[in-house]
Amino acid sequence: MATLQLDVEDILETELAGFGTTVRRGHELGSVDQDDTGVRAQVAGPDGTYELTAKFLVGCDGARSAVRKMLGIPFTGLAGKASMVLSDIRLEGVTLPSRRGHFSDHITRRGDHVAILSPLPGGLYRLMFGGDAQLDKDRTAPVTEEEIQEVLDGAYGPGVRLLEVRAASRFSDASRQAERYREGRVC
Ligand SMILES: Cc1cc2nc3c(=O)[nH]c(=O)nc-3n(C[C@H](O)[C@H](O)[C@H](O)COP(=O)(O)OP(=O)(O)OC[C@H]3O[C@@H](n4cnc5c(N)ncnc54)[C@H](O)[C@@H]3O)c2cc1C
């Protein structure tokens, strides 16, 4: 089932609040150092930089983990061969698909590219796509409305019009694994 990232974050944040934990949005870990007794983390927040100390630090900072990089842990594996876009959008003129389900129910292949359009709550759609045009794009290159509309035209024919892009990002099929999961008091 496709679910909005925002909804997932709301659920997780509510659950965390039940344990008395607050999520500090807009606070970025800048550096970490440690000795035999504990860990010190420098954090940049909206009101400036501050230090946190703890006995241990757990880095849950995703595939591009800053903590992993700060510890110098190699991230070995295979570079991606495919490049795809994920976009949450509002559309006009869509006649398919009207029901929610697994995204594999909604795959369309045309020429060099694949497009997967699935409904989200609130009248939104999630469009995932990839083809030759996406292959050369840098992962940080902005996803343009023209790029999305071009895929909609190719996959679903004229008449499906893009009204709004709520969120869009690029991802690849790179396959890597951290070589170690612990360095002293940091894991
Ligand atoms: C396009 C796409 C579709 C996916 N679809 C699915 C799916 O349908 N189902 C599924 O189960 N999984 C899916 N995944 C995989 C899933 O998103 C990841 O496995 C999951 O998000 C990993 O969780 P995480 O908590 O390890 O990292 P993330 O979700 O990446 O969270 C890391 C957090 O750390 C924060 N952070 C990073 N650096 C710092 C820093 N220096 N200081 C402070 N905070 C920092 C980030 O802002 C972020 O909030 C998908 C992934 C992609 C890319």
Image (cartoon, grey):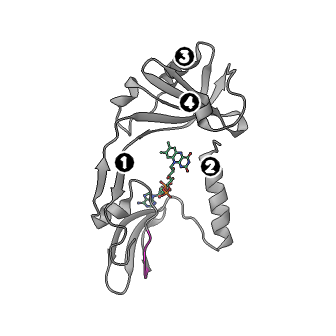
* Label 3 or label 4, whichever comes before in sequence order: 4
Look at discs 3 and 1 and give the one toward the viewer. 1
Circle nearer the N terminus (4, 1): 4
Residue hosting label 1: 175
Other-residue count near label 2 (Cα within 10 Å), few / some / many at <14 / 14–19 / ≥20:
few
Label at residue 116: 4
Element at badge 3?
A: helix
Q: Does the residue at mark 2 contact the one at mark 1 (Cβ under 8 Å)?
A: no
Figure quadrant of residue 121: top right
**Residue for point 30% across, 50% down:** 77
Mark closer to the observer (2, 3) = 3
Q: Which amino acid does label 2 sit on?
A: Leu
- The answer to whether 124 appears left or right of 49 in the picture is right
Q: Is residue 26 above or below residue 51?
A: above
Q: Earlier in the sequence, mark 2 or mark 1?
A: 2
Q: Residue furthest top?
A: 158
Marks 2 and 1, how far apart at CA: 26 Å
- Mainly helix, strand or loop, the magenta region? loop
Quick check: can you spot residue 142?
A: no
The residue tagged 2 is: 6
- Tag of residue 153: 3
Residue kind at label 3, given as amino acid type: Asp
Mark 2 or mark 4: which comes first in sequence? 2
Task: Name the front one of labels 2 and 4.
Answer: 4
Whether the magenta-drawn stretch holds residue 56 is answered as yes
Q: Is mark 1 on a helix, strand or loop?
A: strand
**Local crowd size for mark 4, using a 10 Å CA cut-off: few (<14), some (14–19), many (≥20):** some
Asked whether the residues under the numbered discs 3 and 1 touch, taking CB atoms below 8 Å apart as contact, a structural biologist would say no
